[in-house]
Image (cartoon, helix red, strand yellow):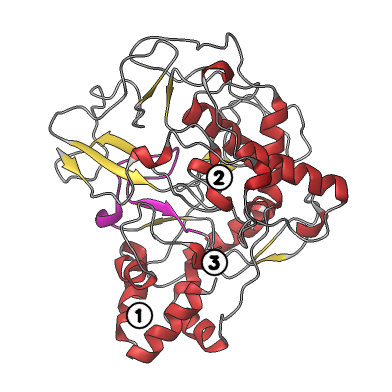
Amino acid sequence: MWRVAILLGLGACGNITAAAPDAMPAHPSDVPIAGLSAPDLATFERGKAEMAKQYGDSDGLGPLFIAQSCVSCHQDGGRGPGSVDKMVMVGSDGYSTGSDQSELPWGNTVREGLTAGAHTPIVPPMVPGVLVTTRLPPQLLGRGYIEAVDDAEIERVQMDQATRSDAIHGVINHVRYDQTPNPDSTFGTFTQGETHLVGRFGLKARDVVIDEFVAGSYVGTFGLTSPMALVEQVNPDGLTDDDKRGVDLTMDPIDDVVFYVRRVAIPPRTGASDAGAQLFDQVQCSACHVPSLKTRADYPIAQLAGIDAPIYSDLLIHDMGPALADGLTDQSAFSTGWRTTPLIGVRFATAYLHDGRATSVRDAITAHAGEAAAAATAFASLSAADQQTLIDFVSAL
């Protein structure tokens, strides 16, 4: 069986008892954007408390689940401590998506948590040709800035890269909106099944807006249905409901978490030197990790509207080569394709790249391949002192 070595096991993401919200210490990575009103700050804290809630059977957990609380995978608004295992049938090259996926009738996500009458976990089949990989959860820091980026800005960067003479040619993941739209259309009006939308959230840029990402995470991670995601995940036992009959959640907890995620700040950056920034540009890191993108002038959160959002990403899909492939496609994203990771909160990270295989910024840079191979080569050609200056710059973001 094909398998990629993993940093964090699935068990790290489940069965965690969350501390009471008033007992949770403040963390420098988990603060609201400046200028929120007192009522908005109260809603922000309510969303943070909802992130810490431990879901159980009476809440509608399951029948299969990966974790029981948001903070299992997004402690302090960050990345981890949990992870998710994915699986796919691949071709003879070990990374291309196989034409026959019949060995995986329950989808591509490993789900081992069982409740509400479920007794059969979803695990990789013991057959040749199955590739099992790990995905670390994305940072939540600065997600409102990312949502605020104008579609036209992402399209502009894609067109600019199309004219480059090197290998860097990122593409938008044009996606379909599969959920029932949020009744609150403040942040966008969508129709279920609508296509050709600009994806930006998730490791392969699958989701368009934060409420879509959050509602999808609730049903995918916890098995908690909501007005935006009404159907339980398919499972080997054929269970269509859980110990809480019908739809598990109202929109209130979804909206509270969405409110929180939209307003988690990009933590203040210190120590990012001008010399480091120049090297970041010199070796072409900035071609994909674009330091800033313009946000919509009409974005509903005034503090994030019409600004240069310092996200260090182009939000495009890039071919990163076979070594980083996971065999999975996601709408128009392909096996070797990954969205440029926004370099937000890097200084709080302990593992890097989509699967945590890199345990240092240096390892992450040198593992870049495919379209980014030339940047890794350029980094390797720097003097030891310049390499450290560039690493210190990235580590300060």
Residue 375 shown left or right of residue 304 in the figure: left
Crowding at label 2, few (<14), some or many (≥20) Cα neighbours within 10 Å? many
- Label 3, label 2: how far apart the Cα atoms are: 18 Å
In-front residue for pair 18/109: 18
| Residue 316 at x, y percent in the picture | 50, 55
Residue 96 shown left or right of residue 92 in the figure: right
226 over 172 or under it: above or below: above
Mark closer to the observer (3, 1): 1
Q: Which residue is mark 2?
A: 199
Q: Let me know if residue 44 is in the magenta part.
A: no
Helix, strand, or loop for circle 1?
A: helix
Residue type at tag 2: Gly
Q: Which residues are magenta?
A: 321-341
- Label 3, label 1: how far apart the Cα atoms are: 23 Å
**Residue 187 visible within the image:** yes
Question: Can you tell which mark lies on residue 129?
Answer: none
Q: Let me know if residue 322 is in the magenta part.
A: yes
Mark closer to the observer (3, 2): 2
Q: Which residue is mark 1?
A: 379
Image quadrant holding the C terminus, namely: bottom right
